[in-house]
Structures are given as C-alpha cells and as structure tokens.
Amino acid sequence: MEKHASDIVNYLRIPKNQIEFLANIRHWDNLKLGYEADFVWIKELTIEQVNSVAIKSIPFHVAYYEQEQQLSLMGSLLPHCSIPQILWTPIQRALPIQLPTLNHNYFGTSEKISIQIVPSNKEQEGFALLSHIEDLGRFIKTSSAIRLKPLKWCIIEDKALLFGIPFLPIQGAVYWKSGQFLIPAGYDFNYPTLAQNIQHNIVPNSDDWIVWSTDSNYYCIESSFIQTLSLSSYRKTISIRT
C-alpha cells in the first residue's frame, strides 16, 4: 500500500563544518539529530521543512527519504544508501544555544560558496527607486515640498537613488531593503540566511548602504552622501556635478 506523504520519514545530511546553519532550524522540535564521521544527520523533517528556504540555504546539504529500510535521494526512486546506525537526539538537546560564529567565505580547508543575486518569487515591499536624474529633475521642479519631505536621495553614477515611500510617479527600478542592503525587486541572495553575515563583512559602518545589481555586483554608499530630497538639494547637487 502506498504511503501517505506524512508517513514518510525524511532525512537531511550536511557536512559537520556547516553546522552553524542549523541555528535557523533549531526551533523545529520535531527533529532528531545524530553524528556520523564528518557528517551531521537530521531526520523526521516534514516535506514542507525539506523544501523551506532555511533548508535550501544550507550549502552542500543532501535530502533523502526512507524507503524499505533504505534512503533514496529526493526525487529518485532508487535506493542510495543505508539508514545511518547512529544515536539520535532531539535537535534542541543536541545543539548548544549559541553556535560558533559563521565565516561566510570559509567552509573547510578549500571549500567556498559563491554569493549571488538570483530571481526570487518572494514578494517584498519596495523601499528605494533608482531613476534617471533627468526624470527626477522634471518632476521635482513642479512638485510640492511636502511631497518630497519623506524622501532622501543620492546619486549613483548618472542616476538618482531615492530612499523611502511613497515612491514618486517616475520611471525607475525598485529595490527592497534587507538590513543595509538594497536588492532589486524580484531578486534575493542564493543563500538568504547569509545576508546578515555578508553585511557585517562588507559594511564597516552600519549606517552605510550596499546597493546590489542583478549581476551580483554592488555599490557602497556612505551615509554622509545621502541627503533629504528637495528642490534646493537637487539644484545644489546638479551644480556641483556640472
């Protein structure tokens, strides 16, 4: 008789040097954890947990499901390996409250992961707008000071970056905010759980901003360059540039 999805036992295997990532799932009290040589095993995950961002963000993880006393890779019908004969402990007891500090660039002697900006289906509220300076100039000359007051701005190369909402009714690329990162709408990190660690490494001043592009490059904007949006600040900035 075919098993219901809720009756299938799912497993996860990760290298021991990725254990820091388990801090994000330690609160899932249905899980059990065990150690085998250079690997950490977790079992009794639900299929929703297996497919969650918290799991998919763990580098070098491998997901299995139990079938006739064997483990098969997710998406495969063929047995892949035996169930590890190890001591299983509830995850909250097996892991300390605080895990070692994560170095996002180092994952063993020679292992590294690439941090990239990738398409994402997750909806995020817009926070910033990158527009042509000329488009901003045409609007700002006829707009009221009250309409501009909530916004701040700076210049990136030949474009104006506007911080805050509501957005001005001009064309531009929308960005959402993650800490001090501005990420293009419809995109996210390939390892979202690393965002805070990346920020701590590349933003020495917590008030500075990092603007990511879809090709995974970024600009650093010092907080001192950002000013309140007004007709006078626009004219002053343009006069300096020319």
Image (tube, rainbow, N blue to C red):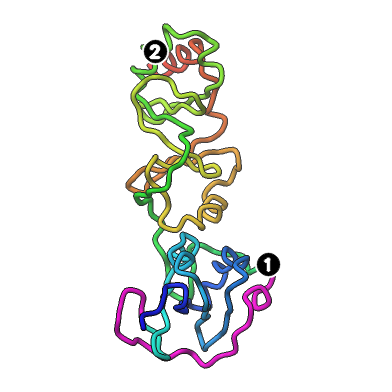
* Residue 5, x across and y down, in percent: 42, 73
Q: Quadrant of the N terminus?
A: bottom left
Q: Quadrant of residue 116?
A: bottom left
Residue at horizontal 48 percent and vertical 75 percent from the top:
108
- Left or right of residue 173: residue 102: right
For label 2, the residue is 139
* Residue 115, x across and y down, in percent: 41, 57
Residue at horizontal 38 percent and vertical 14 percent from the top:
137
For label 1, the residue is 98
* Residue 238, x across and y down, in percent: 42, 16
What span is in magenta?
A: 73-98
Dot 2 lies on which element?
helix
Tell me the kind of residue under disc 2.
Phe
Dot 1 lies on which element?
loop
- Per the image, is 160 magenta? no
* Sequence-first disc among 2 and 1: 1
- Within 10 Å of disc 1 (Cα), the crowding (few <14, some 14-19, many 20+) is few
In this picture, is 224 found above or below 10?
above
**Which disc is residue 230 wearing?**
none
